[in-house]
């Protein structure tokens, strides 16, 4: 069950602050590209963008492509790697050593999230209330969603 | 043709149920957990609830706890209502999606159930159907928010309106003894923001840890925002305690407690004594409104535990 991807996931949490800085810049870039994406057609970009996103975030975060990325609010630990897919915090079953109730060999995604959040700057994203997932967005690119939906600052 | 049964409409003016009024009174409250039967006989519920009648303020009906299959919590709760008792219906995110869950909340309120406890639920690997699909469409916090939306906004999550919203008191849980310790108090506050009215905690065998947790909550501005009932229960033996620590997710039992049990001549009696002492200590912690007694397979000892801990003589607290 423990793969190389899992090791990288831990690296990402340790470097949560650097990734936060990168993400901020990347988000600004995406928003600027909205015009270009529109001309190319969002529909046509969806599949290649989702494939690229899956490959990159898969390596770094063990991303599950929920399509509603909240990594910046969860200490760069993907909440979808939690076997219960909890998006608002850990369950009550976390083992004393910080491993998962369901998969004892895995570190709890929320123990990692808490550690990552402590490394990040700004408001504590963990305290932000996350709505229930929209399962229609599963498998879709959250990068394109950022470009299309976030207003230009 | 037999006469058709008739139902009385719920009183739209009455917002708080019996248990909510009891919490609001400032009394030190007691709830207990009923183990649901593996039987379709309603008389089983009466038999299992009997020890609790008159000694607790409300009875938890668990929802497939430990991911094991039993009579549903909505049915157990409805049968308790028929007996004139006050159920707290547990509802977990494990087995149903948002469509089923909202239907259950509305249905439960129509059956006279006034308290719903929103929990994440144990993973399916813990129970007797490890091959089942874990649903977890909502998490405990979005579940709390869902019940609050139904009750306060009179709407489903879709926005569609209800002609009579479910008037229920919203319960939630917290495990002050599980990692990440630094996030547990914030998680409880998040649940209050989502709509939780009262909390029941995981088993507390470590009172100093609970005291620290309550202090941290106080620093986050908890005072007066919700009621907390600390989870307690008698351990049957040192062996049972070790088994629980190993197999029941989220249960923290300090080694000192297990050693005390192992050293006792009568382990079962010692377990009851530890439980009573724990309740008395917990009652002195500021911000604690009561205890939730989980006496698994020792349910008949609950009246004795309640009597010995003098909970009923506790002074009312400011609310």
Image (cartoon, grey):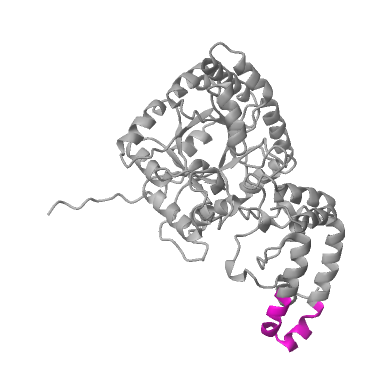
Q: Classify residue A99 as left or right of residue B149.
A: right
- Measured from the top left, where is residue B18 in percent x and y? 43, 37
Residue at 55% of width from left, 24% of height from top? Answer: B235
Q: Is residue A34 magenta?
A: yes
Pick whichever, B185 or A135, lies toward us. A135
Residue at 78% of width from left, 85% of height from top? Answer: A36
Farthest residue, direction top: B265
Q: Classify residue B254 as left or right of residue B228.
A: right
Measured along the vertical axis of the image, is residue B212 above or below residue B221? above
Residue at 53% of width from left, 13% of height from top? Answer: B266
Q: Quadrant of the C terminus of chain A?
A: bottom right
Measured along the vertical axis of the image, is residue A48 above or below residue B259? below
- Measured from the top left, where is residue B220 in percent x and y? 72, 41
Residue at 81% of width from left, 49% of height from top? Answer: A118
Question: What main secondary structure does the magenta stretch of the protein show?
Answer: helix
- Measured from the top left, where is residue B301 in percent x and y? 45, 22
Q: Which residues are magenta?
A: A32-50
> Is there any visible trace of residue B318 in the rendered image?
no
């Amino acid at each position: 069950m423990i793969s190389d991807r899992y090791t990288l996931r831990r690296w990402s949490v340790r470097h949560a602050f650097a990734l936060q800085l990168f993400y901020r810049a990347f988000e600004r870039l995406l928003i600027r590209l909205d015009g270009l994406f529109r001309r190319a057609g969002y529909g046509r970009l969806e599949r290649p963008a989702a494939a690229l996103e899956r490959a990159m975030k898969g390596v770094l975060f063990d991303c599950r492509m929920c399509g509603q990325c909240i990594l910046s609010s969860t200490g760069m630990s993907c909440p979808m790697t939690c076997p219960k897919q909890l998006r608002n915090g850990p369950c009550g079953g976390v083992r004393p050593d910080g491993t998962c109730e369901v998969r004892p060999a895995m570190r709890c995604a929320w123990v990692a999230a808490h550690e990552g959040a402590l490394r990040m700057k700004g408001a504590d994203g963990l305290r932000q209330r996350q709505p229930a997932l929209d399962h229609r967005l599963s498998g879709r690119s959250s990068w394109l969603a950022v470009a299309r939906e976030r207003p230009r600052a | 043709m037999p006469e058709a049964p008739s139902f009385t409409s719920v009183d739209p003016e009455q917002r708080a149920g019996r248990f909510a009024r009891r919490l609001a009174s400032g009394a030190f409250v007691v709830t207990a957990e009923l183990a649901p039967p593996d039987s379709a006989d309603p008389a089983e519920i009466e038999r299992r609830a009997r020890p609790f009648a008159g000694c607790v303020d409300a009875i938890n009906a668990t929802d497939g706890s430990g991911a094991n299959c039993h009579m549903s919590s909505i049915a157990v709760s409805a049968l308790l209502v028929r007996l004139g008792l006050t159920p707290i219906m547990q509802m977990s995110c494990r087995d149903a999606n948002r469509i089923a869950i909202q239907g259950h909340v509305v249905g439960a309120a129509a059956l006279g159930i006034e308290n719903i406890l929103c929990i994440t639920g144990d993973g399916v690997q813990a129970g007797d159907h490890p091959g089942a699909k874990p649903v977890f469409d909502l998490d405990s916090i979005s579940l709390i928010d869902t019940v609050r939306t139904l009750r306060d906004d009179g709407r489903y999550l879709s926005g569609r309106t209800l002609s009579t919203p479910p008037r229920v008191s919203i319960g939630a849980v917290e495990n002050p003894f599980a990692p990440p310790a630094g996030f547990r108090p914030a998680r409880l506050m998040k649940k209050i923001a989502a709509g939780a009215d009262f909390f029941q905690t995981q088993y507390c065998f470590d009172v100093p840890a609970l005291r620290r947790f309550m202090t941290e909550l106080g620093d986050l501005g908890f005072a007066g925002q919700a009621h907390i009932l600390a989870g307690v229960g008698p351990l049957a033996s040192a062996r049972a305690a070790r088994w629980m620590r190993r197999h029941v997710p989220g249960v923290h039992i300090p080694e000192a407690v297990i050693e005390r049990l192992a050293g006792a001549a009568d382990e079962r009696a010692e377990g009851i004594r530890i439980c009573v002492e724990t309740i008395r200590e917990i009652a002195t912690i500021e911000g604690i409104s009561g205890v939730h007694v989980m006496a698994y397979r020792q349910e008949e000892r609950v009246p004795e535990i309640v009597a010995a801990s003098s909970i009923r003589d506790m002074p009312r607290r400011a609310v």
